[in-house]
């Protein structure tokens, strides 16, 4: 519906005006020329991982200078714009969290930068939540972390209807490859014993515990919203347990977050597990949802009265203070036939992955001028290749205290190339057969890296430990690499001819940016050897269900 694409600029509307002598045909010709120029132009990049909405930019001059004048006006707005014409969000997850907050509170209709999502304004809150989260399943853990930082996760989860939560749980099950019926198994039916598969603990006080303890405390254990949260925790922290023994994962986490549920469920009879046609969770459909109105239709007015009143009040306040909302891209009046004007008077959504710091939105709950992003050094930003972060260990220490993100420099960035090796079908067969011995993709990556003399003092090793919930010295307690000889045989078969499987494979100066949903590596293209590229090790791994992350490689 409204999925924003990264590294892009969207102009909602372009208006051109000239003198009376120009005529409609002349303006149409000028508009075509200007559109082609703007499509191929080098637009200024939004800083860092941020997304920027610009309400209006305008310029005036001869046609051959009009495009550059608009670009210059955009650069000025990025550098000096305020909340009246510009809105920044630190990341797409932050943007979506802010949008959800405004939709639920009824404020979205009064904010100019949300008009792209106007189809949602008249929908019930739960449907708004469902549509946005389904569109951004890959970002769901990061969106939840952003909502938690805004102290909105509990409210959003309560506004979520059970039927919508069940539908989203079906989508998560399909994405992660586990049976949705497993979430229906009562904790009491899964005994806690020594024979349970190993899993790292989720101790009280850890970031994920702090994030979810309050929303889950208010929900019964059999509630679909409770189970959806457990599935997200499993995806983020225990992806292999979620895939292969989901009933055990749900039972373990239920005991942690809702210990009274076990006694309650033992005291009452349990219905049989649902089957298809008997209350099974619905699987997401690829067909358009009829509940969502078309962009050209205003939509049903099925909104709770209190929220509808708040929306009306917000709209009245906006009209009384700002007048009519401007159009979204507009070109201003010129003084003579030789000059033409251009103005963008509305949403210009822009995103680019760079290395500068992004300003927080004025509506953000926290003030990053005094409270830096968790996991980020004050005034820091996702580092680009070639930029040195002097205290990676400090960034990692802060990451240990928050699920937001970690960013650090590493000289062993090539370790992440091994994810493409681990994701090959023959290797996946070995991992699935031996997952109990070494649960978690991070552990496999660490042990495999050791076969190539991984530098144990590099910050990436501490990051791996923190991702598994361990202190770095506890990595020694991990089981040895299962099927080691077979894995090395496969590596030799695939990469031996080019002599790639050597310690040098790991040596790559890079920046790593990790969030609850994504892992991004930034490196210089000049540092990527041709044989490595021909072998496909530098390709984007993408969504890795056995790791619970989307992994992307960026080259400058």
Image (cartoon, rainbow, N blue to C red):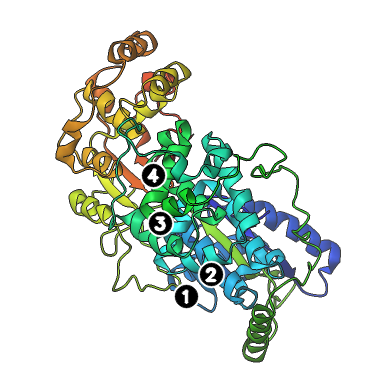
How far apart marks 3 and 2 lie (CA) works out to 31 Å
Disc 2 packing (10 Å; few <14; some 14–19; many ≥20) = many
In the picture, residue 293 is in which quadrant? bottom right
Give yes or no for contact between labels 2 and 1 (Cβ–Cβ under 8 Å). Answer: yes
Q: Nearer the viewer, residue 319 or 109?
A: 109
Of tags 1 and 3, which is closer to the observer? 3
Mark 2 or mark 4: whose residue is earlier in sequence: 2
Q: Residue 553 at x, y = what percent?
A: 41, 37
Mark 4 residue element: helix
Asked if the residues shown at circle 4 and circle 1 are in contact, with their CB atoms under 8 angstroms apart, the answer is: no
Residue in view at x 32 percent, y 44 percent: 512
**In the figure, 279 relative to 159: above or below?**
above
Determine the CA span between mark 1 and mark 3: 38 Å
- Residue at mark 3 to residue at mark 4: CA–CA distance: 13 Å
User: Which labelled disc corresponds to residue 363?
Assistant: 1
Task: Please state which of the two labelled residues, at mark 2 or mark 1, is closer to the viewer.
Answer: 2
Coordinates of residue 105 in the picture (x, y in percent): 58, 75
Q: Which residue is mark 4?
A: 252
Q: Position of residue 36 (x, y in %)?
A: 68, 51
**Who is closer to the viewer here, 19 or 143?**
143
Q: Residues within 10 Å of mark 3 (few under 14, many from 20)?
A: few
């Amino acid at each position: 519906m409204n999925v924003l694409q990264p590294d892009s600029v969207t102009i909602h509307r372009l208006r051109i005006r000239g003198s009376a002598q120009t005529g409609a045909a002349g303006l149409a010709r000028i508009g075509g020329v200007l559109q082609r120029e703007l499509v191929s132009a080098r637009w200024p990049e939004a800083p860092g991982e941020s997304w920027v909405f610009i309400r209006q930019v305008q310029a005036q001059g001869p046609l051959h200078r009009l495009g550059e004048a608009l670009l210059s006006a955009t650069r000025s707005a990025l550098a000096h714009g305020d909340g009246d014409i510009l809105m920044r969000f630190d990341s797409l997850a932050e943007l979506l969290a802010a949008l959800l907050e405004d939709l639920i509170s009824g404020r979205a209709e009064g904010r100019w930068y949300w008009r792209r999502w106007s189809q949602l304004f008249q929908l019930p809150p739960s449907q708004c939540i469902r549509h946005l989260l389904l569109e951004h399943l890959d970002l769901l853990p990061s969106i939840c972390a952003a909502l938690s930082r805004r102290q909105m996760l509990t409210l959003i989860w309560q506004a979520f209807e059970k039927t919508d939560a069940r539908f989203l749980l079906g989508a998560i099950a399909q994405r992660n490859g586990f049976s949705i019926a497993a979430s229906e198994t009562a904790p009491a039916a899964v005994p806690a014993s020594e024979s349970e598969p190993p899993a790292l603990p989720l101790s009280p006080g850890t970031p994920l515990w702090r994030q979810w303890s309050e929303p889950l405390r208010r929900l019964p254990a059999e509630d679909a919203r409770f189970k959806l949260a457990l599935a997200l925790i499993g995806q983020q922290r225990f992806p292999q347990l979620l895939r292969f023994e989901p009933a055990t994962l749900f039972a373990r986490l239920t005991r942690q977050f809702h210990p009274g549920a076990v006694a309650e469920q033992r005291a009452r009879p349990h219905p049989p597990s649902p089957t298809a046609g008997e209350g099974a969770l619905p699987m997401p459909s690829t067909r358009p949802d009829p509940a969502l109105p078309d962009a050209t239709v205003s939509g049903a007015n099925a909104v709770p009265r209190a929220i509808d009143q708040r929306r009306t009040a917000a709209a009245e306040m906006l009209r009384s203070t700002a007048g009519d909302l401007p159009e979204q891209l507009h070109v201003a009046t010129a003084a003579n036939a030789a000059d033409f004007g251009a103005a963008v008077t509305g949403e210009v959504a822009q995103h680019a992955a760079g290395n500068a710091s992004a300003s927080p939105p004025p509506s953000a709950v926290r003030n990053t001028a005094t409270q830096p992003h968790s996991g980020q050094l004050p005034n820091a930003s996702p580092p680009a290749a070639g930029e040195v972060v002097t205290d990676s260990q400090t960034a990692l220490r802060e990451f240990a205290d928050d699920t937001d993100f970690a960013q650090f420099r590493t000289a062993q960035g090539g370790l992440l190339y091994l994810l493409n090796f681990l994701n090959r079908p023959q290797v996946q067969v070995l991992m699935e057969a031996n997952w109990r011995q070494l649960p978690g993709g991070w552990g496999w990556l660490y042990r495999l890296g050791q076969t190539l003399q991984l530098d144990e003092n590099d910050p990436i090793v501490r990051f791996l430990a923190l991702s598994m919930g361990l202190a770095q010295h506890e990595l020694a307690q991990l089981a040895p690499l299962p099927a080691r000889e077979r894995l090395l045989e496969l590596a030799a078969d695939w990469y031996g001819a080019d002599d790639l499987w050597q310690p040098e494979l790991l040596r790559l100066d890079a920046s790593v940016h990790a969030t609850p949903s994504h892992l991004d590596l930034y490196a210089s293209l000049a540092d990527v050897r041709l044989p490595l590229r021909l072998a496909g090790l530098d390709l984007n791994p993408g969504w890795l269900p056995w790791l619970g992350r989307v992994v992307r490689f960026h080259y400058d």
